[in-house]
Image (cartoon, helix red, strand yellow):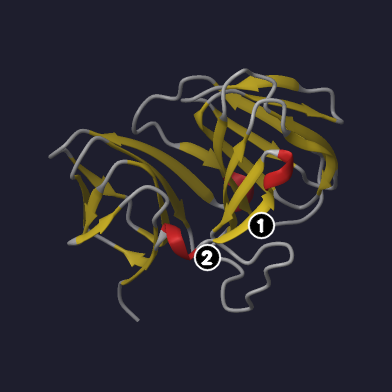
Amino acid sequence: MGRVIDVRRSGERYRGGDPAAGIESLHAFSFGPHYDPDNLRFGAVIACNEERLAPGAGFDEHPHSHTEIVTWVVSGELTHRDSAGHESVVRPGDVQRLSSAGGVRHVERNDGAEPLVFVQMWLAPLSPGGDPAYEIVHGIADSTPYAVPEAGAMLHVRRLGAGERTAVPDGAYVYIHAVRGEVLLDGTELGPGDSARLTDAKDLEAVGVSAAELLIWEMAG
């Protein structure tokens, strides 16, 4: 089939959440009451949600199963508690992963004084079931890959200055989410909240138009 680049703009995302409760959500894939049979997943990625929580707002205890949940805080602080006994505060630069496996419940809240913005990505595991697991990596370094072997995926965090270049990983499926700033990808500009879905990615690079931050998922076929 050859390389395919499918760019999705921030303004195309489905708006959800509960604004009256201080929760605003932007969904890049079919989610909840917004069902789109043509946008269920890309590679292992089944959700990429940008969540905005006002101080004191949050998601009360709710269940997950058979999903790898990876969270990236853009600004503010996220308080996490789960039924396996884990409790942590996730800050910008931290990577948090909750492997819900056969089933787990958790709470996510903004217990801080400032607004919270985070990107949460859900990946489908290669095999269902198993025991829940939790991990947090504080202050992950630029270009340090974070492996999610349960989903056959690797997360790359890339931070670019204006004019800086970075190679895009080669892969059967590559998903790029622009967290902040503007970048050029194969001649197409991506801004905050934009994403690109790459099939058969090879020999591509991203160039910072301004200072920028990218989340890049490299996935096997």
Q: Nearer the viewer, residue 38 or 19?
A: 19
Q: Nearer the viewer, residue 176 or 76?
A: 76
Q: In which quarter of the image is residue 166?
A: top left
Work out which residue is located at the far left of the displayed protein and give it.
163
Q: Position of residue 99 (x, y in %)?
A: 71, 41
Q: Is residue 183 left or right of residue 28?
A: left
Q: Which residue is drawn at 57% across and 30% down?
A: 116
Work out which residue is located at the far bottom of the displayed protein and give it.
1
Task: Give the residue number, with chain letter if any, for mark 2.
Answer: 42
Is 211 placed above or below 184 here? above
Work out which residue is located at the far front of the displayed protein and give it.
20
Task: Give the residue number, with chain letter if any, for mark 1.
Answer: 126
Find the distance from the CA under tag 1 to the CA under tag 2: 14 Å
Q: Are marks 1 and 2 in contact (CB under 8 Å)?
A: no
Q: Which residue is drawn at 52% across and 61% down?
A: 13
Is 108 placed above or below 9 here? above
Q: Residue at x 76, y 52 (%)?
A: 66
Q: Nearer the viewer, residue 189 or 42?
A: 189
Q: What residue type is labelled 2?
A: Phe
Q: Quadrant of residue 4?
A: bottom left
Q: Is mark 1 on a helix, strand or loop?
A: loop
Q: Is mark 2 on a helix, strand or loop?
A: loop
Q: Position of residue 7 (x, y in %)?
A: 36, 66
Q: What residue type is labelled 1?
A: Leu
Q: Position of residue 77 (x, y in %)?
A: 59, 23
Sequence-wise, the earlier of marks 1 and 2 is 2
